[in-house]
Image (cartoon, rainbow, N blue to C red):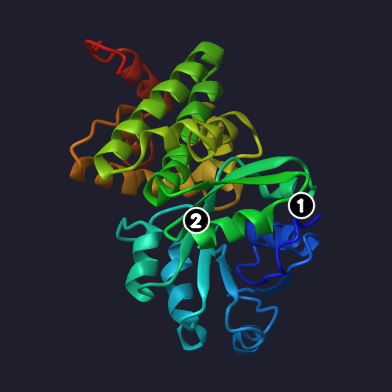
């Protein structure tokens, strides 16, 4: 049920599970929705943008295709276009996605949607809450209202960096938790990894200028709990397979889908090094993925680290 906001026109770019789920939800709220996919276009881009020149572009493609998608829509973007993305990740060079948007389309209203939300549950119309961060409060509020329903709630934030960072780091941590669970290390270890992982996220976020409170919200600890503890998470399932003794390639084959955290681990380690932030859990995940370290040894390395003076 819509809240009474004037019907918006959304152009959803990306026909994967997440793009379809968001498009379906918006259509349920009586918004006009046009979908387009890179490999199997549902409609012609020119026709999609010709419907209304003030369309909201919702990007839901993988992060590696994000810049290409921004470039592809260039001929149709106007000064009235507004862009929101549900993509989680960093660019190939480790840049935040809002930086790509700002470089490609200076001065346009931008927003990111993130938080604990499996596509399958959104499709089933199950209760969901997310965060929307925007550089334009009016646009952010429009999106909050547009997505609102009896089962879908969005909370507005101005912390674009923090909201994006949570969506990247949680995938790496989900691999770590999956490895621990696959090794049979139990609930205590799982809780410790999630909590200490949150500390790593918070330290890196502070160095990058994010708002500390963001990591206590849906796009921080909320998304982390979801991804680390539920087997709908492909990153967790990948970690489980590693913990059970499979090689990286074997674990990838078992999941048989893109493992975002695998690529994220590289970029987060580069970002952490650039900001001189210690991230031991992410470091051990990286060592398992790219330095042939056994998962069992990675967890032991974490447990035998020198005890710091303070938890924080």
- How packed mark 2 is, by other alpha carbons closer than 10 Å (few <14, some 14-19, many 20 or more), is many
Seen in the image, is 31 located left or right of residue 176?
right
Relative to the observer, which residue lies in front, 142 or 231? 142
Is label 2 or label 1 in front? 2
- Mark 2 or 1 closer to N-term? 2
Say if 244 sits above or below 75 in the image.
above
Distance between the alpha carbons at the discs numbered 2 and 1 = 20 Å
The image shows residue 297 at horizontal and vertical percentages of 36, 22
166 or 228, which is in the foreground? 166
Q: Position of residue 247 (x, y in %)?
A: 47, 38
Q: Residue at x 45, y 30 (%)?
A: 176
Secondary structure of the residue carrying numbered label 1: helix
Q: Where in the figure is residue 134, as x and y percent of width and height?
A: 46, 56
Q: Is residue 29 visible?
A: yes
Give the image quarter of residue 74. bottom left
Label 2 residue SS? strand
Please tell me whether residue 246 is drawn above or below residue 150 in the rendered image: above
Instruction: List the residue tagged with mark 2.
Output: 112
- Determine the residue positioned at 50% across, 56% down: 112
Can residue 87 be seen here? The reply is no
Q: Nearer the viewer, residue 139 or 215?
A: 139
Give the label on residue 191, or none: none
Q: Which percent across, then down, holds residue 3?
A: 75, 55
Q: Quadrant of the C terminus?
A: top left
Count of numbered circles on the image: 2
The residue tagged 1 is 123
Side (left or right) of 302 relative to 4? left
Q: Residues within 10 Å of mark 1 (few under 14, many from 20)?
A: some
Quadrant placement of the N terminus: bottom right
Q: Nearer the viewer, residue 219 or 19?
A: 219
Q: Residue at x 55, y 16 (%)?
A: 184
Residue at point 31% right, 33% down?
A: 283
């Amino acid at each position: 049920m819509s809240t009474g906001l004037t019907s918006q026109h959304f152009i959803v770019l990306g026909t994967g599970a997440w793009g379809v789920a968001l498009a379906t939800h918006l259509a349920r709220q009586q918004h006009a929705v046009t979908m387009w996919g890179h490999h199997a276009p549902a409609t012609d881009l020119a026709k999609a943008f010709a419907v209304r020149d003030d369309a909201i572009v919702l990007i839901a493609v993988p992060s590696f295709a994000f810049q290409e998608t921004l470039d592809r829509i260039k001929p149709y973007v106007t000064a009235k276009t507004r862009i929101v993305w549900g993509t989680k990740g960093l660019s190939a060079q480790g840049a935040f996605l809002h930086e790509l948007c700002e470089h490609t389309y200076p001065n346009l209203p931008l927003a990111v949607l993130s938080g604990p939300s499996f596509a399958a549950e959104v499709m089933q119309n199950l209760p969901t809450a997310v965060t929307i961060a925007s550089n334009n409060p009016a646009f952010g509020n429009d999106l909050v209202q547009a997505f609102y329903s009896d089962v879908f709630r969005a909370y507005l934030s101005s912390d674009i960096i923090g909201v994006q960072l949570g969506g990247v780091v949680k995938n790496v941590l989900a691999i770590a938790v999956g490895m621990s669970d696959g090794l049979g290390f139990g609930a205590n270890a799982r809780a410790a990894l999630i909590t200490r992982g949150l500390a790593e996220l918070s330290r890196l976020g502070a160095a990058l200028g994010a708002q500390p409170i963001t990591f206590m919200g849906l796009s921080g600890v909320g998304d982390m709990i979801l991804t680390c503890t539920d087997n709908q998470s492909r990153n967790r399932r990948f970690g489980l397979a590693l913990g059970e003794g499979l090689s990286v390639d074997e674990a990838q084959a078992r999941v048989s889908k893109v493992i975002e955290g695998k690529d994220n681990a590289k970029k987060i380690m580069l970002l952490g090094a650039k900001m001189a932030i210690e991230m031991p859990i992410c470091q051990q995940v990286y060592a398992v993925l790219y330095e042939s370290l056994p998962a069992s040894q990675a967890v032991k390395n974490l447990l035998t680290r020198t005890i710091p003076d303070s938890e924080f």
